[in-house]
Image (cartoon, grey):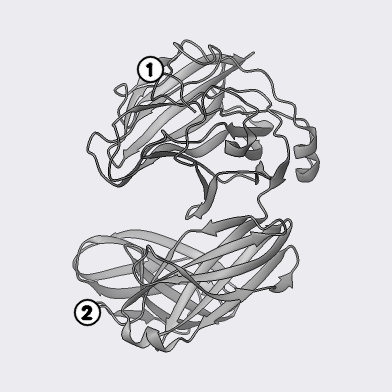
Amino acid sequence: MKTNSTLKCILFTLITIFSLSFTAVNAQCVAPAMVWKNAVLTSGTAGQPGAAYKFPSVTPGVDAMVYLQSLVGGATLTSIDDNTYGYSAAWQPVVKTPAVIGISTSYASFRIEFKDSATGANHTFPCFQLSFIDVDGDNVGVQEFVAAKNADSVTVSNTTLLGLTWLSGNLVQATGPILNFTGIDTSAWNTNINYRYSNTDKVLEVRIGSITALAFTPQDRFTSAFFQQITMGSSSLLPVKYASFDAVANDNKVTLKWITEDEVNNDHFEVERSFDGVNFTTIGLVLDGFANGNRKTYMFKDNAAELQTKTVVYYRLKQIDNNGKAVYTNKLVVRLQAKAGVTMQVSPNPFVQDLNMQFTATANGTAHINIISITGQKMVTKQASVSKGLNTLQVNGLTNLAPGMYTVQLIIDGVIISNQKIIKN
């Protein structure tokens, strides 16, 4: 959707409700009509990461704080609230594409918190909804995308044009088409997405950004965040909410495991593989998993002969609902052959309370240590910066971990380097 020539509107809604039941909450949500005006910079430098802005009295007795957490991929924040177009009562930030022409992904990352106007204490809403409207493109080479973290549920239109991807950190991203939809119209359901939250005072991360093609015109992208209840016609719940998605390599064979927490109208999964991280092909179908309460555990083993000659392989899941719509997970990167200069030693094994991981790294980077159960559930995660050479990480306080066999997994800069079996006594 265009606003000012190259500008574009997205509607972003937060709503309150009055129920303690999770399922009943969503049915009874009634949004207050918030008024976002007169933003004040309270700390930091305007338009720069670390800047904090207050929107006073968005509802009686409640202020909204917006924190600019980061600017990624060359994005810049032109304005925290532009009211020259769109809705004067809406929050309308303007995020600019990179100035350098070329294929890229860029975005501004925000955190939103609600505060009591009198005391400054965080204000918890029993429920609210975050609705992005008209996520589209510029008809040439720009696609807008939005993402929100830790939503209880996500809904899109049955005729949606958005591509949905489940990113690490429980972020659900919606990417619009290159096609531009003119006007600011909350009934343009095929480019809308709703994120629902309950019993919280914040959204930990909201991303507003663009994916650019090889050729495009650098431009401001206009976002209209209108805080009131918007009903989406012909909507449907995102069919699956994931608890985990992991891969373990052994002798150049890969076992994929994933656990779902909620499923609505889920039909099946397709497992897709790539050797370049770009071009994926379907290598198998998984129709059902093993139920455990509200959760289901799924597994797929990739024993293809071509893995024997590869060093790195990429996987993702394509979830298909009963209506044929597809949603993709984030990509997993698995190193099949040991990375030169990287080894890991785990002690003690068996262990009772604490684990020590010692490994060498060929360069500075970021390491993740995951402890994964035999059902594929990620039980513990630790992140740390690593330096070239010998590194030691400790995972403490594992007394409450149930006795049994686990896999400890080392990931450096997104690549699975090592998996080792460990035993908890």
Residue 41: mark in rendering: 1
User: In percent of the image, x 75 and y 44: which residue is there?
Assistant: 22
Depth check, front residue: 227 or 341 = 227
User: What SS does tag 2 mark?
Assistant: loop
In the image, is residue 14 above or below residue 411?
above
Depth check, front residue: 117 or 188 = 188
For the residue marked with disc 2, what is the amino acid? Answer: Ala
User: Whole-percent x and y of residue 336?
Assistant: 36, 80
User: Residue 140: which quarter of the image?
Assistant: top left
Specify whether 241 is left or right of 209.
right
Q: CA distance from mark 2 to mark 1?
A: 49 Å
Other-residue count near label 2 (Cα within 10 Å), few / some / many at <14 / 14–19 / ≥20: few
In the image, is residue 57 above or below residue 197?
above
User: Whole-percent x and y of residue 315?
Assistant: 46, 69
User: Whole-percent x and y of residue 117?
Assistant: 56, 16
Q: Which residue is mark 2?
A: 340
Camera sees residue 400: no
Specify whether 220 is left or right of 39.
left
